[in-house]
Amino acid sequence: MHCRTWTLAAALLGTATGAAAERVANIIIGGGMQNCTSSNAPHPGSVLSLNCALPWLEILAKDPALAELKPEQVRFEPLTNSAAPSYRIDANALGKLAALPESILPSARKQAVLAALKERQESLAAGELQALLPGLNPSEWAAVLHSCLEPQPRPPRRIQARSVAYVSNAATADIYRSLVSAAREVAGGRQPLIGFVTAASANPFAEHDINFYALRSAGAEVVWLPLSGALRRALNQGQCEQLPLLFDGYANTGSALRSQFHLHLDYPDLAAQQRRACEDPEAGLNAVLRRLDGIFLAGGDQARLLESLVNLDANGRHTSASEQLRILRQRHAAGSLVVAGSSAGNAAQAGGHVRGQPVAMISGGESWQALAKGFVRGRGPTIEGAGSTGVTYPEGGLGLFSLGALDSHFSQRGREGRLLRFVADSGLDYGFGVDENTALLVERPNAKGATAMRVIGAGGVFVVDLRAARTMSTSDGFGLEGATIHYLRAEDRAAIDAAGQLSVQLDPTRPLLPRLPDTPAAQMLDLQHPGAMNFFKLMQAMGRSGAALASGQTAQAPKFDFRIARTPTSEFRAAGDQAVSYAHVRVSIAPCRDGCLTAQSATVQNKKVP
């Protein structure tokens, strides 16, 4: 059976006959890359900073991508807020407030603000001003602050640099260079032009430098695409002159920071680029998008990426593609553009349709929350981990990957239960959860319509297959039977053929770990703790011990029991002390109000596995 599985997968992947691989279409990165960044270098001249192969002053001297930077221009300490501004209530400020359009500050709110401030003539700190105006939302508060700001000089901003040429982590370097290599192939062998998008961040300006210099250090020509939800609103409403306050309002919506104001003053060069993109999107954004060989979607909140590229329809849902997204989709479909994304940029790639079913985008929630309460429809940026349930965008994300749902930071944050329920609730066959510092490389379909995938990096990719599964809704909660899971590491491969059938191929050079029927079931408590990697540890123990069964349960009530079993086609493989890959393993989930699977019951069930 193992030989037949290998032959089928090899044929789909084009490896059995030595056929050339197709070009890479998508690079789906799990976040958590181990970057070499200047702001982690308090002693740049003498000490190796985190993940760097040389001290930062030597990197500046030796990395050609950073040759333009002088040490005094570079930030060697963590980013901090600029000096606290002061605000002046006077006739000038009140006049600015009164002149704001209805779309920025609604009339009723404007009258309340003007009434609260009109008798005052004084300078105030932000906290004092806020005490006079309770109840404003972030956009309204941004309008007040911009109107009342007292001018003051700001120091030149310093660059937060990042080097791939001198990063010490081989997996991180491999992921960046794989993107550049894939884009170079699209470009016909010349240096590729890669655009990057920081719109997923609450402050897209703050993520500019590190991504610009990382991609440049990896070998690309680089251009920033100043997309954001604020820019989308300014474009749609013809309000480019209001971009600074729209940007601040958006940055502080759904953000845990809630203190990011006057960002156009902290990043004047980037604010100017954003304004130019707004004033002439055809000559700016659209022209650049038509030239790109690759695009990189940086991390943050995938809802922010959606809002930067997709317009609301008449029902208030993000289904109406912007002109920029239409260009991206057309060029990606034609094979003229490689799409890569990390963390939020991973999840946002999902979308489109498979068998007439929309491929939903996941956004927020932890595994226990998702198992216990399911998913609610997303309405915008969310603070990760702060909600009481999972978040879904049923119509999908950017529509650049349609083979299944996508998730990131996977094993590290215990997201197995979240992805299993999300795929089930979304009516999909497949889901792909990518570990940190790991990437899934997805090729363009071959001549037979099969799409090959392979893993690179430090971790693995968890693959959910629900083709033979069924869900159960009981008074005790969600349940799932007959799901198949796989965990692929570097050199492992998968393929989905034109009929939608998945094939998995573990690296045959790694030794096969045998099943030992008399071995007790592996067990783990608090299986979905968001940070302990307990599901990953359980599966490693199952593979190493030879156990036919494993079980675990969540810690919070209502509790959920996971029952895991080898099947006749299951494989566990590992070389030495490396992590275990596995394929064709069965998992079921059930609520357990009165008690969960015990070691004794697991041992009894062990005899029943076919």
Image (cartoon, grey):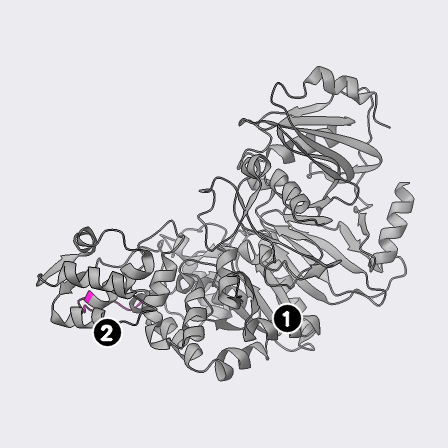
Which residue lies at the image location 67% right of the left edge and 60% below the top edge?
Answer: 401
Residue bearing the label numbered 2: 99
Q: Position of residue 486 (x, y in %)?
A: 74, 42
- Of tags 1 and 2, which is closer to the observer? 2
- Up-down relation of residue 53 to residue 267 (above or below): above
User: In the depicted view, which residue is nearer to us: 266 or 555?
Assistant: 555
Label 2 CA crowd tier, 10 Å (few <14, some 14–19, many 20+): few
Mark on residue 329? 1
Quadrant where the image shows the C terminus: top right
Range shown magenta: 148-157
Q: Are marks 1 and 2 in contact (CB under 8 Å)?
A: no
Magenta region, main secondary structure: loop
Under circle 2, the secondary element is helix
Q: Is residue 430 visible?
A: yes
Q: Position of residue 552 (x, y in %)?
A: 65, 27
Q: Is residue 460 visible?
A: no
